[in-house]
Image (cartoon, helix red, strand yellow):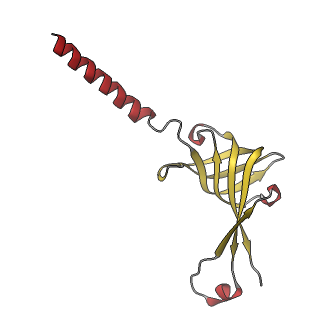
Amino acid sequence: MRKIFLIVLIVAVMGTGGFIFIFYGQKGEATELNGGRVVEVKENSIIAEGFVVYSADPAGQREFKKIEFRIVPGTVLTNRVRIITREQAESGKQFYPTDQDKPGRIEDLKSDTGIVSIKSDKDLFKTSKAAATEILYNTYELPF
């Protein structure tokens, strides 16, 4: 009788653990918004749309969302400047711009600015407003 009780208890614990893993397994993981754009700029926030993904698995679950991000004193802004030369532009062939990461400025964030990623401490799958911890965005430089 005691063996049966232990077996039932072990099965119950394993079943409960499996249930928790399946339904809550990714809860609390870092999320970010990728491949988006700025939709609107407000005084201390931006509204951006793009794909929300888990930071550890960007190819996994994804959802297209529009989220308002507050710019707080700790928000790190990075401007990924994409440099296109005259030769690249006039070649008619496929090319890859040179990228240079520079410190970002809030003034650069305008409507339709390309967003590489926006990170937050909140689970972006479950909210429409969050404080941004990091914002990486694109600008282009045509030195000709």
Query: Residue 100: image x %, image y %?
Result: 68, 70
The residue depicted at 60 percent of the width and 47 percent of the height is 65
The number of numbered discs placed on residues in the rendered structure image is 0
Image position of 99 (left or right of 5): right
Give the camera-side residue of 143 and 128: 143
Figure check: 142 above or below 137:
below
Give the camera-side residue of 33 and 49: 33
Figure check: 75 above or below 93:
above
Image position of 7 (left or right of 17): left
Query: Residue 129: image x %, image y %?
Result: 68, 39
Among the 4 quarters of the image, the one containing residue 120: top right
The residue depicted at 68 percent of the width and 50 percent of the height is 134
Among the 4 quarters of the image, the one containing residue 74: top right
Figure check: 17 above or below 38:
above
Image position of 10 (left or right of 20): left
Q: Quadrant of the C terminus?
A: bottom right
The residue depicted at 26 percent of the width and 23 percent of the height is 11
Among the 4 quarters of the image, the one containing residue 104: bottom right
Query: Residue 126: image x %, image y %?
Result: 58, 37
The residue depicted at 56 percent of the width and 41 percent of the height is 125
Query: Residue 94: image x %, image y %?
Result: 56, 82
Q: Quadrant of the N terminus?
A: top left
